[in-house]
Image: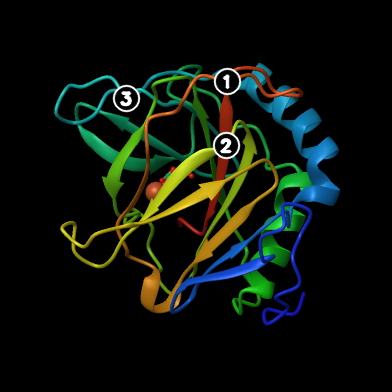
Amino acid sequence: MDLFDRAPGSSGLPRTEHLGPGAVLLRGFAGPSLADIVGDLRKTVAIAPFRHMITPGGFRMSVAMSNCGALGWVSDRSGYRYSREDPGSGRPWPPMPDSFRTPAESAAAAAGFQGFAPDACLINRYDPGARMTLHQDKNERDFSQPIVSVSLGLAAVFLFGGESRSDRPARVRLAHGDVVVWGGPSRLVFHGVMPMQDGVHPLLGPHRFNLTFRKAG
Ligand SMILES: O=C(O)CCC(=O)C(=O)O
Ligand SMILES: [Fe+2]
């Protein structure tokens, strides 16, 4: 994909939007893979069901989460970390499906991060009212590797801020099939998701799902 291609997509908006140095929104990038991704998402969460994790401070997260890949992000009273096992079952997380991995690696390459090889995919489910407050993704070992985020189902407003929590974030609408990549100078920017509005997606019902691919280990 040509990063400087400003030809409008089906939404009439430019296909590629630069969010900052090393950060790009690739609108509809996952489109051709969506049928396979949705099928594999259903299989994956049948093995490792969604659950509401508890923050170290004792709060129940409004986003329901699962993982696939060698490592999975978990939170409980003892902290945030990556784990090889699903704490719910004591078994390894389900493998990362090729239908997830392949478009994530190509999106990273399209954004200038060749050779991205994720070992973790956090799967988020947002029901109406769920949100993710501004945070940095910093439990990974190697910040030279980007984060790749694939949005599915209902649209949401993604907040993309700066290096400081108090930097006023840009508001970016993310719809089914949109991919955001952030790395390099933007790897540790604060980001989050505004509370989800009610709605019903024709394929995925009253939910938004988000897959974030990370090189965690
Ligand atoms: O749902 C999103 O778009 C962002 C998710 C996120 O920031 C995370 O899982 O760390
Ligand atoms: Fe994040």
Disc with the residue nearer the chain's start (1 vs 3): 3
Between the residue at mark 2 and the residue at mark 1, the CA separation in whole angstroms equals: 9 Å
Return the residue at label 2. Answer: 155
Above-or-below relation of 16 to 29: below
**Within the image, what quadrant is residue 80 found in?**
top left
Q: Which is closer to the viewer, label 3 or label 2?
A: 2
Say which element carries label 2. Answer: loop
Label 1, ligand 1: CB separation under 8 Å: no
Check disc 1 and report the residue beneath it: 199
Give the residue at x 19% y 57%: 165
x, y percent for residue 181:
54, 63
Measure the C-alpha gap from mark 1 to mark 3: 21 Å
Q: Secondary structure at mark 1?
A: loop
Which residue is located at x 39 percent, y 21 percent? 129
> Do residues under tags 2 and 1 come within 8 Å of each other at their CB atoms?
yes
Q: Nearer the viewer, mark 1 or mark 3?
A: 1
Q: Secondary structure at mark 3?
A: loop
Question: From the viewer's perspective, is 191 left or right of 78?
Answer: right
Q: Earlier in the sequence, mark 3 or mark 2?
A: 3
- Residue 56 is situated, as x and y percent measured from the top left of the image, at 18, 31
**Label 3 sits on residue:** 61
Q: Amino acid at mark 1?
A: Gly
